[in-house]
Amino acid sequence: MWRPTLKIASVGYGFGSALLRACYRLNLLKRYQFDLPVVSVGNITWGGTGKTPMVEYLTRLFLDSGKVPLILARGYGNDESREMVRKLPEAQFGFGKDRFRSGRKALSEHKADVVILDDGFQHWPMKRDLDIVVVNALNPFGNGSLIPRGILREPGTHLNRADVVVLNDVNLVGRKEVESLKERILGVSPKAEVVEAFHEPLYFYRPDSGHRVYLERMQGTRITSFSGIGTPRSFQMLLTKLGLRIVRNFEFSDHHPYTEAELKEICEMKQLSDSQEIVTTEKDYYRSENLMKNVVKPLVLKVHLRFTSGEANLRNRLNQFIQNGSQAVPVGVSNG
């Protein structure tokens, strides 16, 4: 019953998206740009690719080279934005649906050298100088359909707009699958720089006390895990690869706002299943920080983005991007 409805909805979504792109391409709608270099980090699927760690990587790279980045995100209310503010205090931020307006306001108050457009691949109102797209190797294109029938925000062929494609979570799939995915992407976008990365686990910690538990000490530990992220399977696979024994696991929708009742149920299940620890992600913990530290007190897995191939080429591309700067018109002026 639902399949025809979802198919019709996906067709409607695709038509609307194509019409919007055409309006910007034909200059029927204005596009704006800053007099700073702008790099966009985005994806072509609905959540769960690793955009936030990529933004963090770029931010630290720019800061280390003496450049202050301005990160433009849709809104401070979501967990990714709060996580970035917490982790990257030296960066500047602008929040709002109108990224150009929020960016202009931020630049009027603080100096910045480069703009990072978070979740920007489908943000047509703003021009950018470099498009980085993150693809999750574990589930790159879903069932191949546009949302809501599938997870694609636009067809996979639109990767031809990407300058850099980051294949994330390559450690969770076979080498043959990675090579096949790279071949498919390069067939669509032969000029793109394709790099490989994964979320490297560093240690577990308790945010309320800061106490760290190193990975080798957790091997064989019976745990209850929970997460509300785009690809919960990747979190479970990572815990298993670390040698943890998942006795019970709870999966919630991406960006799920936890309730006290849900967290108490997780605690009860830990007791009933004879688990030794409750484990979750940083994103989940800080999304509901007060409830987490008062009800659950979980161990949180600390990870960072690590590149396994292509990082040198990526850095060269970014250095060139910074050196060339932007050919943009002055801040506040539209180029439509």
Image (cartoon, grey):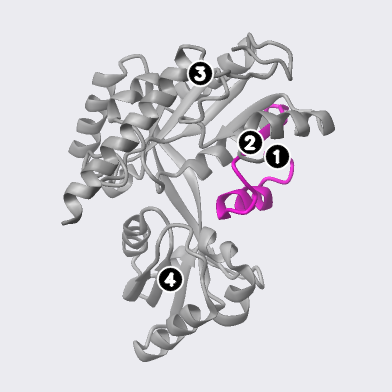
Q: Residue at x 28, y 43 (%)?
A: 9
Are the residues at dot 1 and dot 4 in contact (C-beta closer than 8 Å)?
A: no
Callout 4 secondary element? helix
Which residue is tagged 1?
Answer: 93
Three-letter residue code for mark 3: Arg
Q: Which residue is mark 4?
A: 218
Please name which of the two marks, 3 or 1, marks the residue nearer to the observer.
1
Tell me the amino acid under the disc marked 4: Met
Instruction: Report if residue 92 lies within the magenta region.
Output: yes
| Residue 249 shown left or right of residue 257 in the figure | left
Element marked by disc 1: strand
Q: Earlier in the sequence, mark 2 or mark 4?
A: 2
Name the residue tied to disc 3: 317
Dot 1 amino acid type: Phe
Residue 270: in magenta span:
no
Q: Is residue 35 above or below residue 175?
A: above
Is residue 222 shown above or below 151? below
Label 2 – label 1 distance at C-alpha: 6 Å
Q: Nearer the viewer, residue 239 or 82?
A: 82
Q: Is there CB contact under 8 Å for labels 2 and 1?
A: yes
Q: In whole angstroms, how far apart are the C-alphas of marks 1 and 4?
A: 36 Å
x then y, percent, for residue 245: 32, 73
Q: Compute the Cα span from label 2 to label 4.
A: 37 Å
Looking at the rendered structure, the secondary structure element under dot 2 is strand
Stretch in magenta: 65-94
Question: At label 2, which amino acid type do we have?
Answer: Leu
Answer few, some or many: residues within 10 Å of disc 3's Cα (few below 14, many 20 plus, some between 14 and 19): some
For mark 1, does the 10 Å Cα neighbourhood hold few (<14), some (14 to 19), or many (20 or more) residues? many
